[in-house]
Amino acid sequence: MDTINNLKSELGGKIANADSMDDLEQIRISALGKKGQITALMKNLSALDPEKRKAAGKELNILKQVISSLLDSKKNDLENISLESRLAEENIDITLPIRPEEIGTIHPISQTTDELISIFGEMGFVVAEGPSIEEDWYNFTALNIPVDHPARQEHDTFYINAKKDDQRMVLRTHTSPVQIRTMQSQKPPIRIIVPGRTYRCDHDATHSPMFHQIEGLVIDKTTHMGHLKGCLIEACRTFFGMDELPVRFRPSYFPFTEPSAEVDIGCSFKGGTLKIGEGQDWLEVLGSGMVNPNVLENCGIDSNEYQGFAFGMGIERMAMLKYGIPDLRTFYESDLRWLKHYGFQPLDIPSLVGRAGL
Ligand code: DAH
């Protein structure tokens, strides 16, 4: 009994004084390990006579339990202490200011594209797309521009060596081929808007070899010139944010429309500065017309049953006019100062400035 009591107070004292997990583990091994003191006493039990063995066995088991639970609770204490000290060391200084992060801006081409898509989106147009590398047939022939047609020369086309079914391929000179692709793959009624890259071999302050257009196409049974006019007047006024913007339709020629009209907006060039919406001058902003019946037939649409209108405009040109950007080449120079000046905040909602109902 004495041995057990002595061992109990000796081990209890050691456990209480242990100041690390390693210490504690050593104590556990010295008491309960294979060669530990309690283990040794357990082994000795067999040498005792049955009466004593029973009583001593009971005491030893109690001792074992007491020591185990002292070890456990000390282990717990040591873990808490180490957690506390780590928390104290690793505290975060929330008073430090955050590192400034550079936020980019939306390029005026993307912004203008989004604005135009949302204006036509409100009118029920959906976005369609097509490839940059296009078959000659889609870019020209199906649009009623046959092989020897003078309009082909006006397009300053980039021809590329690759051929498909012996047809030469081109970098599309306009977004109009997507009209053909859509009319082949969808049944009317059709109401699409086609933003995308276009390519022409031309380079100066108002032309770039790669530029962007937005094409529109509406095909239905009763769509007429009045719809074309209403839709484009509304779109121009919304885009420039002027309810009273004068809009004029001037007779023109495009092989894929008949009749065709160019759309001009009212402006003034007085004193060498352009002011949109005032004055006596006119500025061309887009091409349009009623879809030529030949184009419908080329796409397998019965031109006696269906008709519609189409239009196309240059996105750079619209952006230059709305945001006063003088040189088209600067769009592609990636000059950070220019991008910061003309760029838009990422979370800006496309501005449909001041138009009722939008
Ligand atoms: N594709 C013409 C161009 O690039 C623009 C155009 C004019 C598109 C009239 C049309 C349209 O859809 O009806 O110059």
Image (cartoon, rainbow, N blue to C red):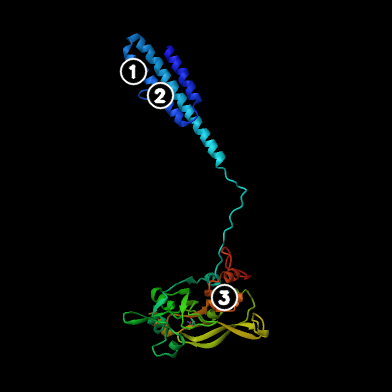
Which quadrant holds residue 278? bottom right
Residue 87: image x %, image y %? 55, 39
Q: Name the residue carrying label 1.
A: 43
Rendering coords of residue 178 (x, y %): 43, 76
Mark 3 vs mark 2: in front: 2
Query: Along the polypeptide, which appears first: circle 3 or circle 2?
Result: 2
> Circle 2 is placed at which residue position?
30
User: Split into 4 quadrants, where in the image is the N terminus?
Assistant: top left
Please provide percent x and percent y for residue 317: 55, 79
Question: Between residues 308 and 145, which one lies in front from this camera angle?
Answer: 145
Residue sitting at x 48%, y 21%: 12
Most foreground residue, 235 or 80: 80
The 10 Å Cα crowd at callout 2, few under 14, some 14 to 19, many 20 or more, is some
User: Callout 2, which amino acid?
Assistant: Ser
Label 1 amino acid? Lys
The image shows residue 165, relative to residue 153, as above or below, that is above
Residue drawn at x 55%, y 67% is 106
**Which of pointers 3 and 1 lies earlier in the amino acid sequence?**
1
Q: Amino acid at mark 3?
A: Ala
Q: Does dot 2 land on a helix, a strand or a loop?
A: helix
Q: Are marks 1 and 2 in contact (CB under 8 Å)?
A: no
Q: Gap between marks 3 and 2, in whole Å?
A: 84 Å
Disc 2 CB within 8 Å of nearest ligand 1 atom: no
Q: Which residue is mark 3?
A: 319
Q: Earlier in the sequence, mark 1 or mark 2?
A: 2
Looking at the image, residue 61 sits to the left or right of residue 204; the answer is left
Report the label total. Answer: 3
Quadrant of the image for the C terminus? bottom right
Residue placed at 37% from the left, 15% from the top? Answer: 57
Mark 3 touches mark 2? (CB < 8 Å): no
Q: Nearer the viewer, mark 3 or mark 1?
A: 1
Task: Give x and y (percent) for residue 11.
Answer: 45, 21
